[in-house]
Image (cartoon, helix red, strand yellow):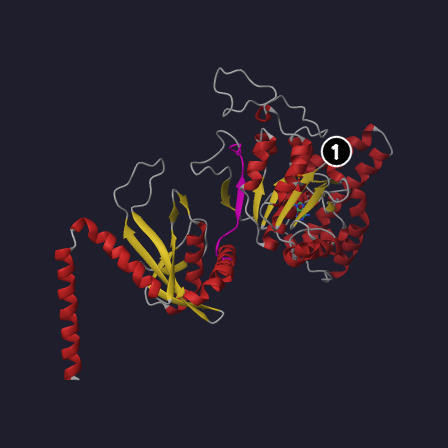
Amino acid sequence: MKEMWTSLASLLGVFAFCQSLLHTIIPPGLRHSVARLLGRLFHSFSTHCYFDIVEMDGVSSNELYSAVQLYLSSSASVSASRLSLTRPLNSSAFTFGLSNNDRLLDSFRGVPAVWEHVVTQRQSQTFSWRPLPEEKRGFTLTIKKKDKPLVLESYLDHIMERAAELRRKNQDRLLYTNSRGGGGGGGMDSRGYPWESVPFKHPSTFSTLAMDPDKKEEIKQDLRDFAAGKSFYEKTGRAWKRGYLLYGPPGTGKSSMIAAMANFLGYDIYDLELTEVHTNTDLRKLLMKTASKSIIVIEDIDCSVSLTNRKGGNRPPVPSPKNNPPGAPEDPNSVATKSITLSGLLNFTDGLWSCCGSERIFVFTTNHIEKLDPALLRSGRMDMHIFMSYCSFPALKILMKNYLGVEDGEKLGDAGDGLMRELEEVIGAAEVTPADVSEVLIKNRRHEKVRALRVLLEVLKGRAMGRKKKNGGGEEGLEEEEEQKRTLESPKEESGEGICNGKVQLVED
Ligand SMILES: Nc1ncnc2c1ncn2[C@@H]1O[C@H](COP(=O)(O)OP(=O)(O)OP(=O)(O)O)[C@@H](O)[C@H]1O
Ligand SMILES: [Mg+2]
């Protein structure tokens, strides 16, 4: 033992001597180059190779850095002794991470990989429009040289996929809007990003959505097949995207359906405000900045812009601030001065550009399908046309469950059974939307179930009567219907019963 210590001490002595010798003979200016040369020499003999993944690539953020950070956080929570904890903006979960200059051993398909989080002070900043962080952060991945192909081909992809999965799980989904305009000129933020986002917390799900259960199941299955269809889309040579056109009267649940789709699949929503987009080029730029696994929505497509033919819209040309400095004459032929056209929109959903990114769903909504250009409706353009209809009896049962807690088949006594039968008979003729029914049920939800249903039945009967008279012609029917609408919209409390002189008066909470 003693001998071992003696030889170690003499080895250290030799090392110190060589170091001071090198310091004396190598001029200070050359020391750095010699160190690098020695480092290279060492690396060429080493059996390992190293990858540096820095946080900032120039002035833009390195996506791989944040992916590695997230990926390691899932394994770091179990094995590392010192962890950093963060809670990202818009997230409802904590993220563990490797502390500065800590190491972690990971393995992929039996291959060991060592990760080190390297943090150094940034040297004096050169001028930049975007100030850089004071610390220079990065990960160094150390692997055996022979494992290099596996790491480059599969491990990094695996990390990106796992990170995206974790991000979706940890983070509340986001709702993006292009309310600043987006795409061109002034509609971008300081990072050149045209979308603004807020956390998306819409509570609508397929179980709260009132619609025919068979139709609902069909849509859910379609979405499931889509989300799991990567290999199918690859095999058939189709772009991995799907289009849904939701149409029907106002208040039948088109927007609620979009929220339910997003909640079902765990996708973000991009709510595209077409009236804010001035040119087809801007539209394409917006599309390019959307992420995969997202739903791109254009609501009320019939009134967003005048899209009547494939040559051009009816809107006046919008000058592009970028191409036309103040005072400069407009070039009528410049692409940027043209307004958004139907063909621009079709290219957005269908053309080559629609394939940048994958796993994306396009949803258009309209109250007037008859106003849409046939080009938008032709087969294959939107994969599924979904009619959101007036409230049917099966849909009504879902609303009764949601608002009053009335389970399907629940016994509510003889009076309740009679009410159910009457509701089933009258609901079709009443032509009320789920939104109308919801309003009545919300206002009566604190009442006893049978009483609340009785109020609803009276409303429906009134609506059905109004419709009948209207269809039979005559002002009387219209007046009756208007009165019923008013009753739905601005209920007044006149009697504790909620029913007064044969007309329904809703009782406010
Ligand atoms: N099918 C439905 N299931 C459950 N709730 C619904 C349904 N339809 C409407 N509602 C209720 O009515 C409200 C309005 O519905 P929603 O905004 O989804 O209708 P819409 O079809 O998008 O209307 P618009 O055409 O005016 O945009 C929702 O907040 C929801 O509470
Ligand atoms: Mg809507």
Q: Residue 46 placed where, x, y %?
A: 34, 66
Residue occupying the far right of the picture: 472
Q: Is residue 369 left or right of residue 141?
A: right
Q: What residue range appears in magenta?
A: 169-183
Magenta stretch, main secondary structure, is loop
Q: Which residue is mark 1?
A: 373
Q: Nearer the viewer, residue 126 or 90?
A: 126
Q: Residue 214 placed where, x, y %?
A: 75, 56
* Residue 381 in view (yes/no): yes
Q: Is residue 116 left or right of residue 284?
A: left
Q: Residues within 10 Å of mark 1 (few under 14, many from 20)?
A: some
Q: Residue 79 placed where, x, y %?
A: 38, 69
Q: Residue 174 placed where, x, y %?
A: 52, 47
Q: Nearer the viewer, residue 103 or 475?
A: 103
Quadrant for ligand 1 reads top right
Whether residue 123 appears in magenta in the rendering, the answer is no
Residue occupying the far front of the picture: 25
Which quarter of the image is occupied by the C terminus?
A: top right
Q: Amino acid at mark 1?
A: Asp
Residue at image coords 81%, 43%: 429
Determine whether 360 is above or below 40 in the image.
Answer: above
Q: Nearer the viewer, residue 259 or 108?
A: 108
Which quarter of the image is occupied by the N terminus?
A: bottom left
